[in-house]
Structure formats: structure tokens, C-alpha cells
Image (tube, rainbow, N blue to C red):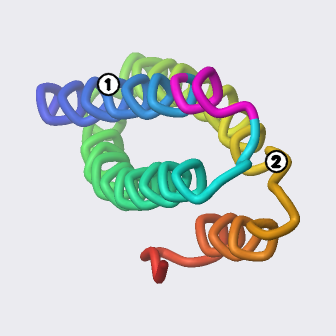
Amino acid sequence: MEILFGAMYVLAAAVSLWSLGQLKAFLAATPSIADDPGLGRYKELARVQMYLALAMIVLLGVGFLAGIAIMSRHGLSGVGLVLGANVAVLALALHHKRVEARVRGLTASDALADEYRRVSETWVKKALPDF
């Protein structure tokens, strides 16, 4: 169980860091949504981020179940391990959320603003992309 728990949390952290890198690279290359190619890049980024979010649910769900087993097997030391891992993942997730909000908060040209807003709302409110 310990190996499964560690693997799930290491994979979750790796996915989060890769995702964060994609978000930051997009922000560096795209200060605003000014044209169709920029909107296209935004849609592709949103799609990838949505699929990664689903993968994270699976990884952390399995990690959560393994964490319960660790806590029941190891008592207080298991609680400490699980708590520490969750605090680290939470800190990373909160930072990721702030960067993601910056991506969804870019200015868009008048012609693309409605579509940009629709994609942004889908990103936040739906599990799968519909754009």
C-alpha cells in the first residue's frame, strides 16, 4: 500500500507540475486572445487541462484509498505521512489554481470574447470539453 500511495502522489505532483508549466508557457506566449490562432491555442490548452483534471481525480482517489489503508495499518505515523503528502499536494493545487485563473482571465478581442468566455466556463463547469 505504501508504494501505491507514494506512486499516486508522486504521479499527481508530476502531472500538476507539467500542467503548471503548460499554463505558464501559454501565459508567456499569449498576453491576450487577440486572434483566431490565439483562441485555438487557448482551446487546446483548456482541453488538455480538462483531461488532466480527470486523471488527477483518478490518481488522488486511488491515493486516498491507499492513504486510508496506511493510516489504519500504521496509526499516528501513517496519519502524519498522509497528512504531509496531502498538504504538499494542496499547496501545489492552490498555486496551480491561481495560475489557471490568470489564463482564464486574459483579455480577448471583441470578436472573440464570447467564444473565449464560453470555453472558459466549460473549462470550469464541465468534465469534458465541448468545443
Give the percent coordinates (x, y) of residue 73: 24, 34
N-terminal label among 2 and 1: 1
Compared with 115, 48 (above or below) is above
Give the residue pinned by disc 1: 14
Pick whichever, 61 or 72, lies toward us.
61
Pick whichever, 38 or 28, lies toward us.
38
Is residue 116 magenta-colored?
A: no
Pick whichever, 125 or 42, lies toward us.
42
**Alpha carbon of mark 2 to alpha carbon of mark 1: how far?**
25 Å
Image point (24%, 36%), residue name: 8
Three-letter amino acid code at disc 1? Ala
Compared with 29, 41 (above or below) is below
Task: Please give the range of residues in magenta.
Answer: 25-31
Mainly helix, strand or loop, the magenta region? Answer: helix
Image point (66%, 41%), residue name: 100
* Of labels 2 and 1, the one closer to you: 2
Q: Secondary structure at mark 2?
A: loop
Give the percent coordinates (x, y) of residue 51: 35, 59
**Callout count:** 2
Q: Categorize mark 1 by other alpha carbons within 10 Å: few (<14), some (14-19), many (20+).
A: few
List the single residue furthest toward the bottom: 130
Give the residue pinned by disc 2: 105
Q: Secondary structure at mark 1?
A: helix
